[in-house]
Image: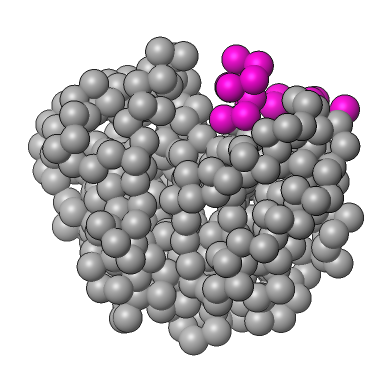
Amino acid sequence: MLGKDPVWALGAMSGTSLDGVDAALLQTDGERIVAFGATGYRAYSDGEREVLRAALGRWPGEGLEAALRVVQSAHVEVLSRFPGAGVIGFHGQTLAHEPEGRGTHQLGDGAALATALGVPVVWDFRTSDVRLGGQGAPLAPFYHFACAKWIGASDPVAFLNLGGVGNLTWVDPARAQPEDAGALLAFDTGPANAPINDLMTQRRGLDCDHDGALAATGQVVDGALELFLEESYFLKMPPKSLDRDDFSLMLDLVRELDDADAAATMTAMAAAAVMRGMEHCPTPPARLLVTGGGRHNPVMMAMLQAGLDCEVAPVEAVGLDGDMLEAQAFAYLAVRVARGLATSCPSTTGVRALVGGGEISRP
């Protein structure tokens, strides 16, 4: 579908934190990052967020018409602001993720989006990976490899995305390609912002703990933290992945705590999950570069820095955009799919062989 020359691709991401749709232009040949382009964001309204929240855990055919309208209209609205893209990478909205069960479900219709926007759309990135025995997540690691090359890293570096769920990518930039042996290790560390957001919604009617303000006034309750770390997920070897609500027990563990202590303890849980995950890195990374909404939480960042031996910094420290890295990743992956290149490998999702996921729909 695409030649080998760089193309401007437009990526869109709507994460499990249910905040809204990120969109970003990236110029790439599917291997190198050539240039970064314009970005945009379309927040979900409170009403739209409630529609999506009610759809979480549902599978195709389970009454998702209202949620689909929210996803499609929000994406058309934000993506139509970017004329000139050669291809669009459309992730959709993850509603359910059971790679060892029913599969994975990202709500969205890429064919309808291609027709509405008049641009080829690559979508349904995860199904092929799951079908071949993979976890279907995380999918950003191949892009993280390109980012490590772009920033000129010479020693191993790790990228941590703190979205609804936390995921970690360890990169050895000395390798030539992301699929090379020893180039990447990736997995979900555990819950991150999603359960904290749910706590804030239930107790305060807010969408999140802005700037960690509530957590900063509370105390971490060690007993609840220790019970959290006894979860069997932390004993599993990577690659491994999670659904947004796999750790719903977190809310039960803090049920008797006041709001501030509950927020502080849940923030500590998310940070502790990352610390456990870092133990799986083949060698200690020189630095941990943090992307996603969690990097705006100074309490979370301070906990990570206190508990890890390496430098912890937002990706902005190396010239990247932490709000748009995931959207850029799906622009990058769209070009890889269009060129017939792999998008995941055994060390990123546990898939049995290299796989290039994604369905291509033309206008």
Classify residue 44 by image quadrant: top left
Q: Looking at the image, what colour scheme do you see?
A: one colour
* Residue 139 among magenta residues: no
Magenta stretch in the rendered image: 198-217
Q: Is residue 324 visible?
A: yes
* Relative vertical location of residue 96 with respect to residue 3 in this rendering, above or below: above
If the image is split into quadrants, where does the N terminus sit? bottom left
As drawn, the residue found furthest toward the front would be 256
- Counting every numbered tag in the picture gives 0
If the image is split into quadrants, where does the C terminus sit? top left
Residue drawn 66% across and 16% down? 204
* Relative vertical location of residue 144 with respect to residue 76 in this rendering, above or below: below
* Residue 201 among magenta residues: yes
Residue 74 at what x, y percent from top left?
33, 22
* Relative vertical location of residue 278 with respect to residue 192 in this rendering, above or below: below
Q: Is residue 24 visible?
A: no
In the displayed structure image, the side of residue 224 where residue 340 appears, left or right:
left
Residue drawn 59% across and 55% down? 190
- Considering depth in this image, is 343 or 305 the residue closer to the camera? 305
- Considering depth in this image, is 5 or 303 the residue closer to the camera? 303
In the displayed structure image, the side of residue 273 where residue 81 appears, left or right:
left
Residue drawn 62% across and 40% down? 252
Classify residue 279 by image quadrant: bottom right
Residue 185 at what x, y percent from top left?
55, 74
As drawn, the residue found furthest toward the bottom would be 181
Residue 62 at what x, y percent from top left?
19, 35
- Considering depth in this image, is 20 or 247 the residue closer to the camera? 247
Q: Main secondary structure of the magenta part?
A: helix
Residue drawn 66% across and 81% down? 282
- Considering depth in this image, is 57 or 140 the residue closer to the camera? 57
* Relative vertical location of residue 299 with respect to residue 199 in this rendering, above or below: below
Residue 61 at what x, y percent from top left?
14, 37
